[in-house]
Image (spheres, coloured by chain):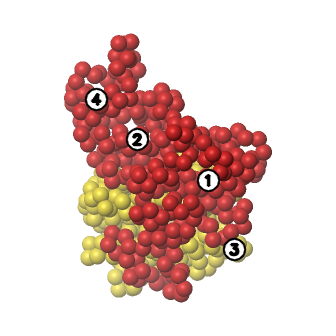
Chain colours: A red, B yellow
Amino acid sequence: MNIFNILEQFEKFDGDAVERIGYTSRRFFFNKVSAKVAAAATPAFLASAMNKAYAQSSDAVEVLKFALTLEYLEDEFYKVGNDTAGLIPSMYKPVFMQISKHEDAHVKFLEKALNLTPGQNKPKFDFTVNKTYDTFTNFDTFVFLSHAFEDTGVRAYKGQAGTLINDPQILEYALQVHSVEARHASISRKILSKIRNNKAIKSWITLDEGSPAPVYKGSNSEATIVQAGANLLDLDLTGIPDTGDIRYKAATEAFDEILTKEETFAIAMPFIVP
Amino acid sequence: MENNLLQNAGPMLEKVNRRYFLRSAGVAAATGAFIMGCTLDDHNLPGEVVDLGTGDIGILNYAYALEQLEAAFYTQVMMSPYAGMTDEEKMILTDIMYHEIVHRQFFKAALGAAAIKGLTPNFDGIDFNSRASVLGAAKLFEDTGVQAYNGAGNLIENVNYLLIAGKIVSVEARHAAAIRDLLNPNSADFSGDDVVDPATGFDKAVKPGVILPAVQPFVKNTISGSGLPQ
């Protein structure tokens, strides 16, 4: 598939896109820029040019920037993990190489969409949080953080879907990344379950169980059983044993919940060096 | 039957190991009269055309149809587990069955009077005694579900419905990865290059016009999505 170019997509929705951005030409965005224009081509300038032209799509730009921060975090985390000799047992290496490949692609995609040069907006990360975590010397810790980052990613992307409802193509791209994060979360949780010999850790999120707690709780807790106003436990759940908390757990597992942007940043912040 | 399955399956099945289905085609599994819904009186007769409707209702019915198919499949899987099903497989397949039942009943309730009736599945091509056939079908259903929800997202007008779809699709993706890992443990297959484009890291997003013909072979009723948003 062609690499996404944000302006090209905007044009599909609105043929006047280029004109409305004013003196900015398509070429400007396609890197065939004169030195003079290049000087003005800061992300802030681009964002503001787009903001003026597209009130609603400024939201989309904000979502893309937010997503990029998360993807930078995941991308560096897996790159360092995969490059650290002796950390990842060889039997699990193909899994983490595959995840890393996707995060790398997500970063490249978002940078391109935002017209950034590689690494331009990348924060500095400290995955040990001032040596609180033995992240890259203990496989258990590495997988623990992996599953937390992936579950955070799933919930964070989901939290932005509504913001993109008027940007259909960007919404679709975001959904396509969102489900990949969920695949990652699933396998990472499965490996965590195995190495901890803990069957209660499943590929899906049960109640709001899990650590760190903010990844699973928040203003829309994973333990939610009311969806679109319907209490799932009031439905006819014939086929699911009505004993103990089986139905309750199933109802919470069947729906993932959102994290707000603020909640997501609060989770990510300790890993970002100010 | 075999030809039919192939012809109707279309591009969605290209990457799927067709042999899982074809090898066992004709082996009538447990029973052909297995019903997806709950009660007998609200079911369509096989062969009857089921119109999903238009707009958001149509998309919700589309999701309801897919969830009916999944829930019926896993229910049948767990009614007659294949020989040698491990504890891990039992746990995963049972959990998924529960989730799909919740999804199905949620859509049924949410749609109320606008809901399509219970569909009659056609699992003749699946050998429920075979681990490879069952897990292969599960993989197909889960990947299809992910791609269908991803493709339906930007056809939805109501933001609350979009959110619901988002809450469900990630669970389907979790299922897909778990099933894929059963088939090829600790490999890259949990999100293999066949479903996640290695160049972009994107899952697929597939529109109803492609999904519906691909799942039609698994349903005895004829499903019409002609009123769905494109």
In this figure, which residue is indicated by the disc labeled 2? A64
The percent coordinates of residue A44 (x first, y second) are: 35, 30
First reached walking from the N terminus: tag 2 or tag 4: 4
User: Mark 1: few, some, or many residues within 10 Å (few <14, many ≥20)?
Assistant: many
First reached walking from the N terminus: tag 2 or tag 1: 2
**Chain letter of disc 1?**
A
- Compare residues B34 and A65 and report the one nearer the observer: A65
The percent coordinates of residue A67 (x first, y second) are: 45, 44
Helix, strand or loop status at disc 1 = helix
State how far apart marks 3 and 4 are (Cα).
57 Å
User: Mark 2: few, some, or many residues within 10 Å (few <14, many ≥20)?
Assistant: many
In this figure, which residue is indicated by the disc labeled 4? A49
Residue type highlighted by circle 3: Asp
Same subunit, labels 3 and 2: the answer reads: no
Q: Which mark is residue A145?
A: 1
Helix, strand or loop status at disc 3 = helix
Marks 2,4: beta carbons within 8 A: no
In this figure, which residue is indicated by the disc labeled 3? B87
The percent coordinates of residue B168 (x first, y second) are: 44, 63
Q: Is residue B172 visible?
A: no
Same subunit, labels 4 and 1: the answer reads: yes
User: Mark 4: few, some, or many residues within 10 Å (few <14, many ≥20)?
Assistant: some
Which residue is depicted at the point 61% across and 52% down? Answer: A146
Q: Nearer the viewer, mark 1 or mark 3?
A: 1
Residue type highlighted by circle 4: Ala
**In-image side of B217 versus A200 (left or right):** left
Marks 1,3: beta carbons within 8 A: no
